[in-house]
Amino acid sequence: MTATVLQPARIALVGNPNSGKTALFNALTGSRQKVANYAGVTVERKEGLVTTAGGRVLHVLDLPGTYSLRARSPDEAVTRDAVLGRLAGEHEPDVLIAVADATNLRLVLRLVLELKQVGRPFVLALNMFDIAQRQGLRIDLEGLSRELGAPVVTTVATRKRGIEDLVAAAEALFVAHAEKANIWREPTAAEIRAAHGQAQQIMRSYVRPAERPDTLTGKLDGVLLHPVAGLLILLALLFVMFQAVFTWATPAADLINDGFGALGGLIGQIVPEGLLRSFLTDGLIAGVGGVLVFLPQILILFFFIILLEDTGYMARAAFLMDKLMGKAGLHGRAFLPLLSSFACAIPGIMATRVIDQKRDRLTTILVAPLMTCSARIPVYTLIIGALIPQRNIWGVINLQGLVMFGLYAAGILSTLIVSAVIQRLFWRTGSEPFMMELPAYKVPDAGLVARQLWQRAMIFMSRAGRIILPMMVLVWALAVFPGPPPGATGPAIDYSFAGMIGHAIQPVLAPIGFNWQMSVALIPGMAAREVAVATLGTVYAVGDVEGAGLSALQGLLHAQWSLATGLSFLAWYIFAPQCVATLGVVKRETNSWLWPAVMFGYMITLAYLASFATFQAARALGWG
Amino acid sequence: MSEVLLSIDPAVEAPSAAPSAASATGVVQPLSQAVRGRPGVIVRVAGDLAGQGVLDAGELERRLLELGFVEGARVEILHEGLFGRDPIAVRLDDMRVALRRREARAVEVRFEDSAV
Ligand SMILES: Nc1nc2c(ncn2[C@@H]2O[C@H](COP(=O)(O)OP(=O)(O)O)[C@@H](O)[C@H]2O)c(=O)[nH]1
């Protein structure tokens, strides 16, 4: 090749779910990829670069998996529009790569026939060819290629086999410029049937059924989908998962906390006392730390989620949970986002993109923050430690643990009830049909898991980080400005905007038993739920709640708060939308301020009612 | 890639023609009422059989078709959920698919009586 720059080509990957499309995209582009969102919609846009042997750059776009160009969900609509070149802000692809699981060709052949009508040149990648060979499945590649009028390449995405051939085939198609007219339109039922017939015919002619078909999947399903054993195994798995999230993540989170604490201390020694130091340590460093501290939990949770997805178990979990989710008016697939919300509602809300129907998806987004996220734990721990006696009931059950369990149960229960109410009363629809393929079980690929995990971490950091950080700084500003007048005696925050707002809303919060310190703590606590703990430390002037301050604060609360007040505060935190980052993500995901507003409104109403009921009931019981 | 180039005789028995459609015996039942472990062949897919749902009949029919529920395909219920034996996991030719009994009403299956 000479030094002339070859014209870059645009390639798009299209295929059924579970065909190994993600693996193939990674094998093609390696680390040269970036994840963003499509303009105006909430679907993730994954693009990467490959350089061909001849030096041409290919822009590879990984489109959401689908069975048909007739889109049924926002994700599938993106695939359709991208393939047809109709997507706003996107160029039409020059060449399509149709990704197929070689062991499961029937449905993808029908999709390929649809793709053919689009007129774009395409190459068929028969992925998972290692499994096909192991099963003794035989495919007449030349015949298939002739029949489809497109090159066929076999690949093993996880071993990076066949990748060069695939790239070369795509480049050759680009150079040949063999576009035809686009005659695609939405197929009718009759046309889908006809295409199935044609696909069936192709299968008969060119594919000889496996000599040693996969029997492992059937055997595993016998246990994992067993009505009783299957559910028990799922529960055990979830138990292990949450144990891991909460116990393994703690040391890492502590390390991050300590690290940022030390960094703050260092800056404190270099930068003189004053506004700049306060901004750097309490605003900026605390803000970055506040984002990073969630990373261990997110990583562990997503490690499990990716593992469950790549093995093929996630579809089984959705199957097992579908009935329960259906009671709440939700789809079995809502299980995954809601599960993720235990760590943090932000990845949970981001994960709702697996739900096809818009209303089901909105409902899941709206209820996700009711699941007890990990940011509530510091608040729960503080209040429980301060006000619930450390003793056992019936000799075995720890009372503090019981209250903690009750708070989690209340979160789950309210999630299910609120979603049932939204689905039945507001949308007045039943739930979207639950229909999904149960893919064959696979041994996950370590490299692929690691890469996806890395990607999730980066997405979390940039998306959540970009919202949380400015919010933290804003909240810091609210709590610092204006400064206290000379000779002031109370804590500085009392004179700030946060203090003023807290005092202003205090009369409204009196019937639910909140004193002014609590009211003030709610304002910075909007940054993230656990920030309320730090703010309580500030207003009660006990200093750093990370260290010895925590027990001092608990002592103070024990002395100054009634049990009724403490319980009311806990009830508040089950429901209250005390997290601007969540609201920001909802805005991003729904592309409208309406839904964050609805979320804020319903959650704060529930919080007030729950706290009111709790406080009044506790007082009536003589705990006031 | 030459190692995998095999010419296959098209006259080889078709994979999904196993339960002969010619024998018109057997009972026709919606998939929603089928019992576990009894194989059959889909004879009709029609959205309106499922009654009023979230999707209109035509949309449901097309979705079922796209997922491989097409006339002539072999089906068998493999697994059932714990509560109300719902949803169901079925073998559909060489694939496995999960769906609720509600939507399975739209799929009519002929079961061979010998398999009872
Ligand atoms: N043996 C084998 N496994 C593969 C191959 N390609 C993907 N996989 C595995 O198949 C599973 C699903 O792949 P993934 O890329 O997530 O599928 P997607 O749903 O199409 O994105 C993962 O566990 C992959 O490791 C392949 O060519 N050979």
Image: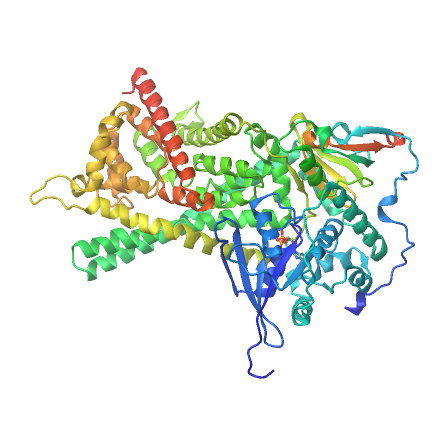
Question: What residue lies at 53% left-to-right and 45% top-to-bottom?
Answer: A353
Q: Quadrant for ligand 1?
A: bottom right
Left or right side of A481 for A22: right
The number of numbered discs placed on residues in the rendered structure image is 0
Residue A468 seen: yes
* Residue A90: % across, % down: 53, 58
* Residue B61: % across, % down: 71, 37
User: In the image shown, does A603 or A82 lie closer to the viewer?
Assistant: A82
Left or right side of B77 for A58: left
Question: What residue lies at 29% left-to-right and 18% top-to-bottom?
Answer: A619
Residue A210 seen: no
- Image quadrant holding the C terminus of chain A, namely top left
* Residue A51: % across, % down: 58, 72
User: In the image shown, does A351 or A44 lie closer to the viewer?
Assistant: A44
Question: What residue lies at 6% left-to-right and 43% top-to-bottom?
Answer: A487
Left or right side of A287 for A216: right
